Amino acid sequence: MAILAYGINYRTAPIELRERMAFPEEALGAALMEVTKAVQEVSEAVILSTCNRTEIYCAAASANELGLIEWLSENRAVPMPEIQNAAYTHWDQDAARHLIRVAAGLDSQVLGEPQIMGQVKSACELARNLGAMGPELNLLSQVTLQAAKRVRTNTNIGRNPLSIAYAAVVMAKQLFSDFEHKKALLLGAGDTIERVAEHLTDQGIGGMTIANRTIANAETLAARFGAKSQQLTAVVSELPHHDILISSTGSALPIVGKGAVEAAIKQRRHRPIFMVDLAVPRDIEPEVGSLPDIYLYSIDDLSAIIEENRNQRLNAADSAQALVDEGAWRFIKERRTHQARAMLRQFRENAEDVQIAELDKALRELRKGEKPETVIAQLSQNLTKKLIHNPTVAIRSASAENRMDILETLKSVYRLD
């Protein structure tokens, strides 16, 4: 049985092909059941389908991926040559190494991103629940998730933010130890502010207000996060009631001026305000940064931090590779151990069959009145002959064919000089 990892990702395929190859969530279950039945070589399967990759992990009877490619082509309605030109293939230890890298975020478009481990875990759980995962892939999933967790625990691969929105939220949380009691005012309602709102919610912010020039857009976004909504013109009155201000609008002129912030500081009795201006042109007058009790960062400030974080993650990725290789090797060793157990079980069963057969024969002889000494002697001879028969044949055959490797193995196993 071979382990196969076959797929495409953001490095090998453009978004147009990734869209066509992706499996909708509601179709994954049916696809798992279909591939194990339609492809003769495939007995187990896990499908990992995200915006950046579509990969199938299989336990296959032979090291040949052609049947799987044919099934993929038919199921996703994509010509085989188009798939083959963009796809990669990994077998056995390389397949394990690849999946561990994926789960640890080392193969992600955003290096070290944390969501992929949960996606790998969910893909494995779905296959397990549907009966598409057997002992081979079950072992692979266990070793993979353990190794990926070690990478994330023992390295800095995911500890430093790489997105502007996330970096802004992390910095705010570092400033305020009682984050769950703080309130954030977000200016704008575009993609950047949406991501900021997601991260603030994930980090447990106490409350949010979203202000936008078009109030309907603010209301729609605020409804998603249980936040308040306001017109952009209400910023001056709202500012004193918020500890965090993060802004990303398309305004051509500053929205928050030095005078308005000075008034807010007095009203807050000098409790600090953390501000991040993600807009170009800037939404917050640069002079605001000179005020006491104000911590103002621009998009360039955060970009410099993110670049440093990216370098730290690249260094962490180098050290993480050793853990990946260790995990892949552990999978191979565990797999060999499992296979050896099956062989050992059969070896013992064969010996027990011989023992039972000879014991039955001896008991029959005793019931006929044969002398016990004679029966025991015959039992001993028969057991010895039958138990050494196969090794004897192997030694003769290896000697005749000059297979010194087999002879050395037999000498080691039977402790022969």
Image (cartoon, rainbow, N blue to C red):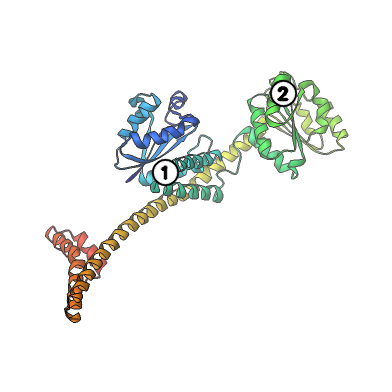
Please indicate, yes or no, whether residue 321 appears anywhere in the rendered image: no
Pick whichever, 273 or 335, lies toward us: 335
Q: Is 222 on the left-hand or right-hand side of 116?
A: right
Residue 397 lies, in percent from the top left, at 14, 60
Image quadrant in which you'd find residue 221: top right
Badges 2 and 1: C-beta atoms under 8 Å apart? Answer: no
Q: Is 390 on the left-hand or right-hand side of 330?
A: left
Kindly report which numbered mark, 2 or 1, lies closer to the viewer in this rendering.
1
Residue drawn at (53%, 46%), measured in percent from left and top? 316
How crowded pointer 1 is (Cα within 10 Å; few <14, some 14-19, many 20+) is rated as: many
Mark sitting earlier along the chain (2/1): 1
Pick whichever, 248 or 216, lies toward us: 216
How crowded pointer 2 is (Cα within 10 Å; few <14, some 14-19, many 20+) is rated as: many
Pick whichever, 122 or 406, lies toward us: 122
Q: Which residue position holds label 2? A: 219
Which residue is the extreme one toward the left? 400
Q: Is residue 32 shown above or below 327?
A: above
Image quadrant in which you'd find residue 137: top left
Residue 133 lies, in percent from the top left, at 41, 43
Disc 1 residue type?
Met
Residue drawn at (65%, 24%), measured in percent from left and top? 190
Disc 2 residue type?
Glu
Q: Is 395 on the left-hand or right-hand side of 213?
A: left
Residue 378 lies, in percent from the top left, at 17, 75
Q: Which residue position holds label 1? A: 133
Question: SS of the residue at dot 1?
Answer: loop
Residue 48 lies, in percent from the top left, at 46, 36
